[in-house]
Image (cartoon, rainbow, N blue to C red):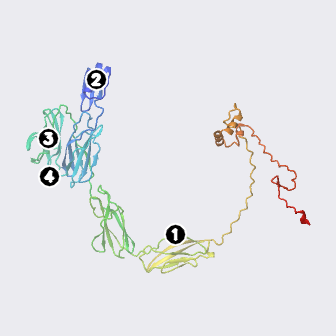
Amino acid sequence: MNICTLNRILSISLCFSLSLLIIVASGLTLDIKNNLLYVADTDNNILEAFASNSTSVPPSSPKNLKTLPISTSSVILIWDEPVLNTNMTSIIGYKIEYKADSTGFTTITADTKSVTTSFIHQGLDSSKTYTYQVSAINSKGASNPSSSSSVKPAATTVPGGLIAVAISPTQIKLSWQPPSNTFGQSISGYDIHKVFGTDAYAAIGSTNGKTTSYIVSNLETDKTYSFAVSANIGAGSTEPSNTASATPRANSVDVSITPTSSTIPIITIPTSPIKLTATSVSSTQIHLSWSPPSSDGNSPITGYKIEVKKDSGSNSTLVADTKSTATTYSHTGLITNSKYTYKVYAINSIGTSTASNEVTATPVTALKLNPFGKLSIDEGKSLSFAVKVTDNSLHGLIFSLDNNPPIGAKINPNTGMFTWTPTDSQSAKSYIFDIVVTLGSSTDRQSITIVVNDVLNKPEPTQEPEPTPITEPEPEPTQKLGIASFVDPKKDPQSYVDRYNKESTYKKWFDENYPEYSSIYEAVGLDEPQVEKPKVETPQFGICGTGTKLIDGICTLIEMPQAKPWWKFW
């Protein structure tokens, strides 16, 4: 039987004919799991390995997914490796997805890069239910997800997450997680039980307190075995763990059964906001400012709660939730000279932090003028503006000018309206003086600068002399262009002229492509013929006879007066 015939029998798409292999090959082995055909020589040395199917596909889905709690913040996932068809390459990893409550699935890990069929998920919330699904990965991609399994993190009082894996034709390896709640007692060891049926156990071995794995030997190949584990705590032992089963096969090999793992950050309430300050900015307003908490509890801050207390009263909620990450707040509409005390709390998705430091401020009359910019005005024009204070709730203000105000400048003492029209003599100068506001015993003043522009006495602009006209030079005589590039010197130049005069398309081509030439004659190097204008000869006429008249060069008969009969003369 030749190799091509054998390939057809084994459904192998690659057909080859290598005489060397045909001559020396003594063995062919088909690796169904990895879809490889091995060719060996007489010494059983592999000469070549060929893919047994070039149309391999992603694997089928993992089976029998189980999820078990192993503490109040972690769970373990256990599943069976999918059965591979002949056109599926070996598993190289698993994709793990989960969702909390009713949310959509989120990828924990896109590829564990391990063939281990267990996974520990940590950092969970014991009040939530988590649902998981697993996909197998090979060289062609990921399978469809497995059936889902749900679990709620909880404390365990028995060993949990027991895994059984056949590691040889006669051995099974067990691995488990310790109970998370031992009621303050230490674990002295574990008992290994063979499970024969419901509540039917037989002890087959034990380990010390820190060992959480055990190898069961002397088993029969192709027979399924089930096991459970209990922990020895104090004077007694716990109930058995979950049951795990495995079947030793002829091709079973020792592989790692240590679960891969991932941790979800534990979300807590944030720490308190820090550096809270309160500043009185007017007689009716206090400004609050603070810094975000040092920890947001692994959940973004969504807002702040603000509490206030007036004088010796009790705390009340000023703002239940600012719904903003801004760290400032202005409290308005306050009573002058009353004492206000504040605390601030941070809020995230889990809840509200403890209170920040406590601060106190008292809104008092703050008499302060708004700042003035540098002003400019032309002489002879009126300048006016209203002077304002920062606290517009104040009443009874008195305004005045001080420190050498310019002559003619005035301010209304009650409204603060400033007016001034600089004269011609006050132009081209800067005036610096003070505007003052007074309320009872409180006073504030600010310096102001006004520049007066001189616009009435500016000198007339000097007229520039008219420029001497520049005589343009006479244009250079136009140079001749010479014979055009299309002219063949071996041909008669007149032939080009004839074509131009007889062929309209040729004439159009020349006119469009050689507009720089005045005529076809110039282009081919011929003198343009001089056409004589016809002479208009004035016709010569003799003298027209009696009874005719020269009209348009023709002697034309005209009507003569009729003579009287002879008898009428008598």
Q: Residues within 10 Å of mark 4 (few under 14, many from 20)?
A: few
Q: Which mark is residue 3?
A: 2
Q: Earlier in the sequence, mark 3 or mark 1?
A: 3
Residue under label 3: 207
Q: CA distance from mark 1 to mark 4?
A: 76 Å
Residue under label 1: 373
Say which element carries label 4. loop
Q: Earlier in the sequence, mark 3 or mark 2?
A: 2
167 and 509: which one is in front? 509
Amino acid beneath label 4: Phe
User: Mark 3 or mark 2, which is nearer to you?
Assistant: 2
68 and 12: which one is in front? 12
| Image x and y of residue 55, in percent | 30, 34
* Residue 123 seen anywhere in this rendered image of the structure: no
Q: Earlier in the sequence, mark 2 or mark 4?
A: 2
Can you say whether 527 is above or below 562 in the image? above
